[in-house]
Image (spheres, rainbow, N blue to C red):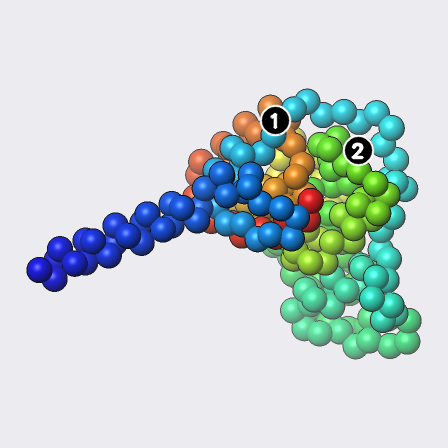
Amino acid sequence: MRSTAVRTAAAALSALAALLLTPATAHAADPGDTIALPVREALAALPVQDEERTGYERTKFRHWIDADRDGCSTRAEVLLAEAVTAPEQSAGCQLTGGSWYSPYDDTYFTAARALDIDHLVPLAEAWDSGASTWTAAERQAYANDLDDARALIAVSAASNRSKADQDPTTWQPSATGYHCTYATDWVAIKTRWSLAVDPAEQTAISETLGTCPNAPIEVTLAR
């Protein structure tokens, strides 16, 4: 009797999970809704289209604003949020001391100036993948997205400049242990902002995720 009850309960939970973690849920959702689905299914749900760079200028994404007018720019907000050891903060949000970990290259730093704030999905990549049709306000929101901790990340200046505006087709973090997280977060941000992937990008991410757990991602849709 107990065994039957356990199997029945397990089947019910499995059915519930399947209902919650489906691409159809993502398609039915609206901006502001939170969705959850396995990362490989999230990748499969992204639109696939060729990239188009025409008209791109970095200045079309106004970034490092002080959205809450507390004296700290978006860059400083990320540094404060991701510090391993909290820095001291003086007038004008000047940061001294503190320490940070750069997951791209598995390295620690003790000076904020040694770090860049990386747009996990670069601004140029966002433009290529759909942001060219956005309003200036939408591009500003993307460039300063503090509402999803995966969107902006403090990393070594060297790794960020090595990456530049490349996608996972041509660039991966030198820290191989971070590849699964990088691919998963890339899919999460593209899902959050309803951005497309090009065929080569989809293949490269799929190959990486094929070696990773098919973990669920939770995303609050921005668009």
Query: In this orientation, does residue 129 appear?
Result: yes
Q: Nearer the viewer, residue 222 or 169?
A: 222
Task: Describe residue 215's horizontal placement relative to residue 132 as left or right.
Answer: left
- Which residue is the site of mark 1? 48
Secondary structure under the numbered disc 1 in the rendered image: loop
Residue plotted at (83% across, 61% down):
67
Q: Nearer the viewer, residue 97 or 61?
A: 61
Residue plotted at (69% across, 44% down):
223
- Residue type for callout 2: Thr
Q: Label 1 near label 2: C-beta < 8 Å?
A: no
- Residue type for callout 1: Val
Residue plotted at (67% across, 36% down):
195
Q: Position of residue 87 (x, y in %)?
A: 75, 74
Q: Position of residue 35 (x, y in %)?
A: 54, 50
Task: Describe residue 96's horizontal placement relative to residue 197 as left or right.
Answer: right
Q: Residue furthest left?
A: 1
Which quadrant, please, contains the N terminus? bottom left
Secondary structure under the numbered disc 2 in the rendered image: helix
- Which residue is the site of mark 2? 133
Give the mark nearest the N terminus, 2 or 1: 1
Badge 1 crowding class, 10 Å Cα cut-off, few under 14, some 14 to 19, many 20 or more, is some
Q: Quadrant of residue 80?
A: bottom right
Query: In this orientation, does residue 158 appear?
Result: no
Task: Describe residue 49's horizontal placement relative to residue 211 as left or right.
Answer: right
Q: Nearer the viewer, residue 12 or 198?
A: 12
Task: Describe residue 3's horizontal placement relative to residue 107 as left or right.
Answer: left
